[in-house]
Amino acid sequence: MPYYIGDVIKDYNKLVIRTPEAFGKTGIKVLTKTRVEEIDAARGEVRLADGSRLPYDSLTIATGARATRLDIPGVDLDGVFVLRDLSDALRIKDYLNGRACRRAVIVGGGFIAMEMSEALRNLGIETTVIVRRHRPVPRWDEEFCAPILEELEKNGVLFQGGTTPLSIERNGEGLVVKTNSGDLGADLVLMAVGVRSNTELAAAAGVEMGESGAIKVDFRQQTSVPGIYAVGDCCEVFHKVARRWVYIPLGDIANKQGRVAGQNIGGRPAEFPGVVGAQSFKVFDLEVAAAGLNENEAVKYGFAPASAFIQGLPVGRPIARGERLLVKLTADKTTGRLIGAQCLGAKGAVQRIFALSAALWNGMTVDEVGYLDLPYAPPFGGAWDAIHVAAQELARSL
C-alpha cells in the first residue's frame, strides 16, 4: 500500500487479489458491507447486524488486526491517518490528491513508517519520523541502526528519536504535533505504531486466547471451540526457532494459515508447521531483512546467544565497486544451532535471508551453515559468500 500511495503502483485494483464477483464464479458467496455482531457457538450460528442469522457447520474467524492509535488528543482530526488496509490507503491517496500537502509527520519507526517515509518523499513531501526510542526498527539489532538513519538522512527524511507525541492540534489549514521535544507542523500525520489483534467476537464466543492476547490455535488452525478455526492477524502462529506460539501479523503467514484451515474444513487434513520470523522491507536504496530471533528475543526465550557481525560483499571481490552487505548471525552457545540472522545492503540482503531462513527452518548448526552449498557467480557473491564468512567467524567464538 505504501507503493500505491507513492505512485509506484498506479492502479489500486492491482492490490485486490480477488473480487466478490470472482469468488462468485467459484461458488463462493461474499457478503460485503455486512457486520457480524455475535457468534453463537452453541447453536452454530452467526448473528448479523440486521438481525438475520447464518448457520454454519464450520466457521473461520479471519477478523485480522486493527491499527493502533495513540491515546492522545487530536488523533481523530481530519488529516490524521493510520495505514492498515486498502481503504486506509485510498483515504490517504484521496487526501494527498485533494490538498497541497507539503509536510508530513510519521509517528512510529517500524516497517510501515520506513516504507511510507520513502513514499512521501518520492511525492516531494517534507517528512519527519518521530519515535520514542532512539532508533527505528528495533526488530534489528543496534548495528543496523546507523546505516538506516544514514539512508533516511541522505533522502531528506528527518528522524527524531526520543520524541513522544503529546497531542495533535488544528492550526489554520494545517496540523501541529506537540511533542516533548517541541512542536512539528504538518499537513498530514500518519500513526504507524503497530497493530492489535481483533479478537472481540472470538472472545465473546468463548474462544481461548493465547499468551500474546491473540486467538490460540493448533497446527490445523483449530481454536479451543470445536468447529471454529482462526487464521491471519487475529491469531497466533508457532515460531519454530523459539518453540513458542507468538503473534506475527504478516500477510504471507495469513495466506498459509487460510489454506490450511480450508483444507481441514474440506476434509483434507493439513497442518501449518509454523514460521521462523522471516521479514523484510525496503527503504529507498536499502534492503533490510531478518529471520529467527534477535539477541533480546533469544535471551527472552531461554537461549544463550552469541553473535558475529561482518561487513561483507554482495558480489565477488574482483567486480566489487564499494558495495557493502552487513550480516549478523546469532547462535545458541549450548547447541551451536543458528537461531537468528539479519542482513542489510543496497542489494543481496533479502537474497541471503532466503537461504538463512531455510537454514533456520531446518535447525542447522553454525558449522553446517559455514559450508552451505550456495550458487556461486561473481555478480551474486564470492566463492566464500558473506553467509559463509559470518558463520565461520561465529563458529570460532562458540
Image (cartoon, helix red, strand yellow):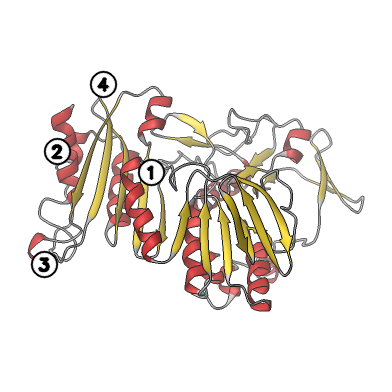
The residue located at (68%, 45%) in the rendering is 60
Disc 3 to disc 1, C-alpha distance: 29 Å
Q: Nearer the viewer, residue 371 or 326?
A: 326
The residue located at (23%, 28%) in the rendering is 336
Q: Which residue is mark 4?
A: 334
The label number, if any, that marks residue 140 in the structure image: 1
The mark lying in front, picked from 2 and 3, is 3
Q: Amino acid at mark 4?
A: Thr
Quadrant containing the N terminus in the rendered view: bottom right
Q: Residue furthest right?
A: 51
The residue located at (56%, 33%) in the rendering is 218
Q: Nearer the viewer, residue 78 or 248?
A: 78
Bin the neighbour count of mark 4 within 10 Å (Cα to Cα): few under 14, some 14-19, many 20 and up: few
Q: Nearer the viewer, residue 222 or 305?
A: 305
The label number, if any, that marks residue 392 in the structure image: 2
Vertical side of 368 occupied by 68: above or below: below
